[in-house]
């Protein structure tokens, strides 16, 4: 029976560290288990599937006629969405989403472009459907007033563009559903750690299989501020005003993606319990989710020490940058 698992960890909340610990446990190359930078940043593969894609018969790419047809139909739609985004985005070629879009567009001429095999498809889909903003279509209304009094009319994405976004969503959902179908057909395990739920990043209409299970990490106000500070340090983009606004107006922070993950998840763990409290129950729950509970039970003491060490290093980073250098309490 296929085993399909997705764990949603907010950006900045240690998804790579958790991949090395809970997803791979002791089953990856020892040489890869280490920090990759002085700012306590880790890099691990966040998808684990018990099959070598190179060994999959190429016929898998052609046995879904509907998907082959959908691929041909969606190409001009993706090209149009790309053109809209390029026209509205300053320095578009320097953005992370630009190469993702063009990698898909330039290769969709091949049947299915093996797109359905991409475990982290949410990034590719978001590169098209999450970039177009309503404020691109806002406009000023003066009505005889001074320039300073010009009223900005909120923008609405045109219906024709919304229809193209919907068609792109449906195509990526169809690819993802095919991925799930292949996993179920061959009883494969697909275990993934990612940031957001497919309802957010692919399509709210995507059909998830019955044996699909999900786990989500929740953040309280303090944890949200903490990980935003870490993201700024590790991304080398310190924004004091943004941190102060989070502290002053925590309810106004954009937690919509995490809210969706929490709402639809089968189970939940807490960032505060995992890292601030070093709670063994929540930590074990992550190992158990990926079938590594025996490894946790056998190595509990060392694992808890690893989690504490990771958190202490993050606290030290924040102390050094925000408290000691900038005089800001996090």
Image (cartoon, rainbow, N blue to C red):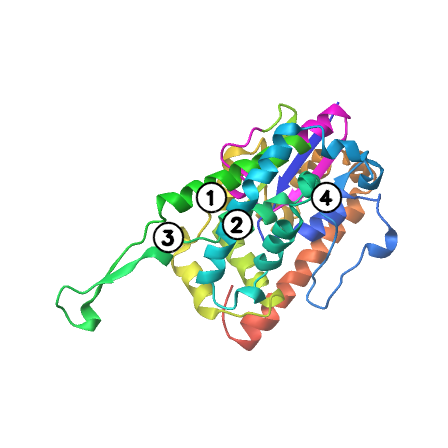
Residue drawn at (56%, 37%), measured in percent from left and top? Answer: 171
The residue beneath circle 1 is 165
Please give the residue where the numbered disc 2 appears in the rendered image: 128
Q: Quadrant of residue 67 in the image?
A: top right
**Mark 4 falls on what kind of element?**
strand
Spatial separation of the CA atoms under disc 4 and disc 2: 22 Å
- Secondary structure category for the residue under label 2: helix
Asked if residue 144 is positioned above or below residue 32 in the image, the reply reads below
Residue lying farthest to the bottom in this orientation: 325
Label 3, on which residue? 134
According to the picture, the residue beneath numbered tag 4 turns out to be: 47
**Which residue is the extreme one toward the left?**
144
**Sooner in the amino-acid sequence: mark 3 or mark 1:** 3
Label 4 vs label 2, nearer the camera? 2
Decide: few, some or many residues near mark 2? Use Cα within 10 Å; few <14, some 14-19, many ≥20.
many
Magenta span = 180-207
Could one spot residue 279 in this view of the protein? no
Disc 3/disc 2 C-alpha distance (Å): 14 Å
């Amino acid at each position: 029976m296929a085993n399909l698992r997705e764990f949603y960890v907010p950006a900045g909340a240690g998804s790579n560290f958790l991949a090395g610990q809970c997803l791979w446990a002791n089953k990856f190359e020892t040489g890869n288990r280490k920090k990759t930078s002085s700012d306590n940043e880790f890099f691990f593969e966040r998808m684990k599937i018990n099959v070598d894609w190179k060994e999959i018969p190429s016929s898998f790419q052609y046995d879904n006629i509907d998907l082959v047809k959908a691929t041909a139909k969606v190409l001009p739609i993706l090209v149009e969405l790309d053109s809209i985004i390029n026209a509205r985005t300053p320095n578009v070629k320097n953005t992370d989403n630009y190469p993702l879009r063009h990698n898909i567009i330039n290769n969709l001429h091949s049947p299915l472009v093996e797109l359905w095999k991409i475990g982290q498809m949410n990034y590719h889909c978001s590169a098209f459907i999450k970039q177009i903003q309503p404020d691109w279509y806002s406009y000023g209304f003066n009505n005889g007033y001074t320039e300073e009094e010009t009223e900005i009319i909120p923008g609405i994405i045109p219906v024709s563009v919304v229809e193209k976004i919907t068609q792109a969503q449906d195509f990526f959902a169809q690819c993802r559903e095919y991925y799930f179908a292949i996993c179920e057909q061959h009883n494969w395990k697909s275990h993934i750690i990612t940031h957001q739920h497919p309802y957010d990043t692919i399509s709210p209409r995507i059909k998830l299989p019955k044996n699909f299970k999900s786990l989500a990490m929740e953040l309280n106000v303090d944890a949200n501020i903490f990980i935003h500070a870490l993201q700024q340090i590790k991304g080398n983009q310190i924004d004091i005003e943004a941190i102060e606004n989070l502290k002053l107006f925590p309810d106004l922070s954009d937690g919509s993606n995490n809210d969706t993950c929490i709402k639809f998840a089968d189970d939940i763990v807490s960032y505060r319990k995992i890292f601030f409290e070093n709670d063994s129950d929540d930590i074990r729950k992550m190992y158990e989710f990926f079938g590594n509970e025996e490894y946790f039970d056998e190595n509990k003491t060392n694992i808890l020490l690893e989690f504490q060490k990771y958190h202490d290093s993050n606290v030290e980073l924040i102390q050094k940058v925000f408290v000691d250098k900038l005089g800001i309490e996090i």
